[in-house]
Image (spheres, helix red, strand yellow):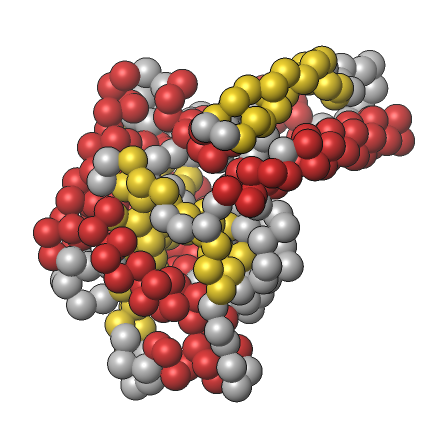
Amino acid sequence: MCGLAGIELKAYGILIFPVLKFEVMSGEFESRLSSPDGVAKFRNFVKEFESELMEKKNVCSDILSTIKLKKLKVCDGRRRWAIRVLKGISAVGVDGSQIQPLREFGIPAGAVQVAAFKVEHGSGNWDVSYMSRIVRLEENVDATRYALEMDVLRRNADGRSYLFYDGSFTPTFVREMAREIRSRYEKAAMDTVKKCSETETPLFGYTDRSYSRDIAKAHGVNIYDSFILSEMDVMSYTEPFCSGEICYCYVRFSPSLPSRVEFPEWMRRKFDQFIRVLCAECMLGSTFSYPYVLERAHSYAAVSERERRLIVEAVGGISLSFKWVSKLG
């Protein structure tokens, strides 16, 4: 179970914000996860955690009043407005998928597949291109996928197209990785941001459900930014926050929690114009809160179970894992 262990007050300028300290318990129990007891405990854990987040969000409600918000005006229906805004614009969505080394089949290699979906809005012309790479067992598949996704983005940095990436250019999880792997992520991202800045190619890194805490940490609290901003009006966005060559903002185009958007620093000059294009792409999507070109890129990049089976059958295995065979029973 989760609970607040204490609240302190911390001053930032003329405002005072609470510094929340809390402890998350492990939720350990002696049952199968799928048992009635396990399911009930999991459900209760999630509800209690959500309740704690809401409590902390209410305590921190003053933070939202310090952030400059802007509203987008959408008229004549969302899709019609989006079609009008995007007419003549070239957009590219990039996403990837992967196959981990299939140890149970004795296959010491995995693979990465990245799809780039490109559309010329208003013309009916679109295309899909692929980049794939085989990964050895000892390599980091996730880092290889990220580097290949960044490579595909750079290949499309033509100074004309709007580029959309499904993810972050500052992924927080890499902070816990070994220095060599962390450097691969950072170099791939910065090379991409640099190329798009040099060519003035608009670039968005879109995270639909973000658990970043940059705004929260700046105010001395421990809560997700998206929860702090959950009272944003629909069709609104925050001012850009920048750190070096990468900036970020939060957008809310549907009743769901705000999404995080990252982009190169040079885009601040025409920030409102670029956000209109981003919003229009989302209005074309099936949920109104996720860019259309990324929806398409994701569907093309995914490796289906059928494709996985074809690869296993074509490659064959060096030897089956008896541990894997025993689990089938």
Residue 115 place in picture, x, y as percent: 33, 56
Answer left or right for 154 relative to 136: left
Answer left or right for 244 relative to 99: left
**Viewer can see residue 125:** no
Classify residue 123 by image quadrant.
bottom left
In the rendered view, would you say 223 is above or below 168? above
In the rendered view, would you say 271 is above or below 107? below
- The number of callouts visible is 0
Q: Nearer the viewer, residue 125 or 226?
A: 226
The furthest residue to the left: 198
Residue 122 place in picture, x, y as percent: 33, 84
Where, quadrant-wise, is the C terminus in this rendering? top right
Q: Nearer the viewer, residue 133 or 102?
A: 133
Q: Residue at x 24, y 36 (%)?
A: 244
Q: Residue at x 14, y 62 (%)?
A: 158
Q: Residue at x 56, y 43 (%)?
A: 64
Q: Nearer the viewer, residue 324 or 202?
A: 202
Classify residue 184 by image quadrant.
top left
Residue 74 place in picture, x, y as percent: 50, 76
Q: Residue at x 37, y 22 (%)?
A: 175
**Viewer can see residue 63:** yes
